[in-house]
Image: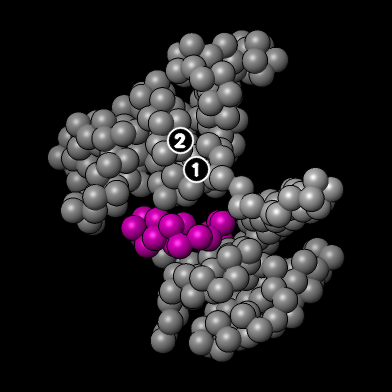
Amino acid sequence: MKFYIVDDDQAILYVLQNIIEQNFNDEVIGMTTSPRQAQNEIQLRDVDIVLADLLMPDLSGIDLVKAVKAAKPQVRFIMISKVQDSDLRAKAYQAGIEFFINKPVNLIEVKTVITKVEQSLQMAQQLSSISAMVNQFNGAKPTPEPVSVKEGANTILKVLGMAAELGSADILQVITLMDRLDEHYRDVDLTSQLKIDGHEKKIMVQRMRRAIKVGLTNLANQLLDNPDDDQIRHYANALFGYENVHHQMLFQQHERPSGGRVIMQNFMDGLLSESRE
């Protein structure tokens, strides 16, 4: 894989370069402290993955992602930031990033995130190659693939800032199953469909609940910062129920002793519905 790194802290550039080149069979083909220079060079070079700082002078990391994605949508982005602002993070996921890496940079986190993004990119490339071969064999012109329910659900999880949570992989697996069976969450027999026992199911559901709780917390924070955001208000109603989100908002403002509840049935059914649109 070919990497490009942009961060206004030069020390971060060399730290990330060393991690990538010493722990992966990859190459850093460029790095800079200037986001404008990064934008120009990424569009001219053969780049697979970009690591970009969130807050930079002259051009923010989010604006850099948007500009590059408009010209080269296949480029994957990993955002680097010490900022924990949920609204900014949600906007970054909406712009098209894959994951966040927190500052100060942690070796294990960097290696884990890069591995996930590389695996995702390799899978996409393999599927694209297979599709092209099939189309060529059939004498058909390549046509854009429709967005799958899994892809749609993953986009929503990114907006909610929960895509990196362990339980999100379980959520996507179950959503795919619900879509295939065309059943509500309560009607899906997870033990038989996934070939797991009751204990494994319990652990999986706990992971999902924890991930959904993170999504509820992030969404409440986004609404506190931007109460007129129509998309966030829509997800509040569709996935959690606005009253439930309101309770979480009051809890986070220390005006209520407990937050909103995680209702698996509502969230999973709502997520499936939203992912099909």
Q: Are marks 2 and 1 in contact (CB under 8 Å)?
A: yes
What residue do we see at 65% from left, 15% from top?
193
Give the vertical position of 183 relative to 64 (above or below): above
In magenta, the rendered stretch is 85-103
Mark 2 or 1, which is nearer the eye? 2
User: Residue 47 versus residue 129: which sits nearer the camera?
Assistant: 129
What residue do we see at 48% from left, 11% from top?
187
One can see residue 52 in this view: no
Q: Which residue is mark 1?
A: 152
What x and y, as percent, mark residue 277? 41, 39
What x and y, as percent, mark residue 75? 63, 66
Give the vertical position of 154 relative to 3 (above or below): above
State the quadrant of the N terminus.
Answer: bottom right
Q: How far is mark 2 from mark 1, CA to CA? A: 7 Å
User: Residue 214 versus residue 266: which sits nearer the camera?
Assistant: 266
Of the image marks 2 and 1, the number of the one nearer the N terminus: 1
User: Residue 225 versus residue 131: which sits nearer the camera?
Assistant: 131
What x and y, as percent, mark residue 251? 22, 39
What residue do we see at 62% from left, 80% from top?
43
Q: Amino acid at mark 1?
A: Gly
One can see residue 45 in this view: yes
User: Residue 58 versus residue 107: which sits nearer the camera?
Assistant: 58
* Residue 25, magenta (yes or no): no
Give the vertical position of 226 relative to 134 (above or below): below
Q: Is residue 259 left or right of residue 140?
A: left
Q: Quadrant of residue 48?
A: bottom right
* Residue 97, magenta (yes or no): yes
What residue do we see at 20% from left, 37% from top?
246
Q: Which residue is mark 2?
A: 276
Q: Amino acid at mark 2?
A: Arg
Q: Residue furthest front?
A: 139
